[in-house]
Image (spheres, rainbow, N blue to C red):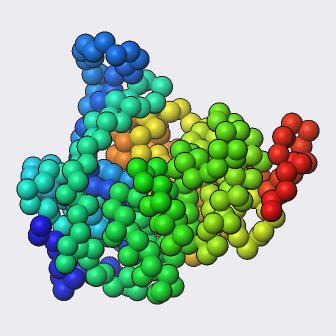
Amino acid sequence: VHPRRATLQHVAMGDKTTVLFCGAATRDTILLVPKLPTDERGGKIVALDCRECAAGMATSAAVAAARCGAAATICASVGNDGAGAAYLADLAKEGLDTSWVRVVHESPTAVSTILVDPRGERLVIPYYAAKLSSIDGDWPPRIGIGKYNALLTDTRSPAAAHELLLAARQAAVPSVLDGDVTPDLTTLERLAKAADHVLFSRPGLVSLLPADVAKPLCGSLNTCAWSWALRSLQKRLPTAAVVGVTLGEDGVVWINTTEPLVSWHLRPPVVHVKDTLSAGDVFHGVYTFKIAQGDTILKAVAAGCAAAALKCQTFGGRLGSPNADELSAFMATWDWASSSTQCCACPAQSDCSFCDKGLD
């Protein structure tokens, strides 16, 4: 293992808002196919289009933030191979600081093959070599977190993520967790307890809930049900400022712990979807950038939703991330304030089966 050292001089950030991203680094091959496979018989599908790029949750989030104006640094691991070299070259073109990307010898870089159909739905087939998440005397790296305005981590490099989250809390640097599913659920909860803003994917949230709370959420669009589930989980995350869940085309539901009886739901803008790959990553990246700039939670969520919606209009995963001008122009035409709804964690609704449940 040959990590970058903590003594390495970082690229000058100037006056830009600085954000550190820690987590997944992959080389993605994205194929547009006539339809996703639906049986187990094998065969051949001829792709209609193809893109390749550096990706992974934290990486795609970092690119999205950088395109919108952040000075983004990525902390991740790649193999000493062609895919790893291509990953670093891609991020150099995007203007990211890759000083904290370590090159792990005798390990392949993580790769993903993604099939996307004409509706924008996808099938993701990733491979992560175990050695990429290995720990030694130089990893996780000792990063001076105080120089950054915010931190985002995903769940793919849990040792480094947890150390950085704790350091960020000590330095009063806002931190965001992209709470996706993990093989070991104790890892996800451990990371969530260390983060300030915990934003789960739908399956990530459901994986941490008791069965009686999770079961009614299957296929549910009832924001009251999701709010109640978030409130139930928030009791286990006493230091989190924000706990939320991204629901794809159904938007984002979140609770702000400074408003104990209130939850929020933001419906995303309606767009023509070509590819949903990396939409959640783009959301998290732009949300973190806006939090780093000092924006309100609502405005940060709205900017993240707008960026994700713009991304969905372009085939190619995170390659569709908008730049600052594109995002600003889109936000100016979308009445995002009217798309948000404030409600109680369990409002009285005739169609709500949760209203007779207490929150204790």
**Residue 13 at x, y = what percent?**
32, 79
Q: Nearer the viewer, residue 358 or 147?
A: 358
Q: Is residue 68 visible?
A: no
Identified at 27% across, 15% down, the residue is 42
**Residue 276 at x, y = what percent?**
46, 38
Identified at 26% across, 31% down, the residue is 50
Identified at 22% across, 82% down, the residue is 6
Q: Is residue 187 visible?
A: yes
Q: Quadrant of the C terminus?
A: bottom right
Q: Quadrant of the N terminus?
A: bottom left
Q: Nearer the viewer, residue 168 or 208?
A: 208
Q: Quadrant of residue 102?
A: bottom left
Q: Quadrant of residue 80?
A: bottom left
**Does residue 305 appear left or right of residue 275 in this picture?**
right
**Does residue 223 appear left or right of residue 356 in this picture?**
left
Q: Nearer the viewer, residue 58 or 336?
A: 58
**Residue 224 at x, y = what percent?**
78, 48
Q: Nearer the viewer, residue 219 or 263?
A: 219
Identified at 70% across, 44% down, the residue is 212
**Residue 221 at x, y = what percent?**
70, 38
Task: State whether residue 88 is above or below residue 352.
Answer: below
Q: How many marks do you count on the picture?
A: 0
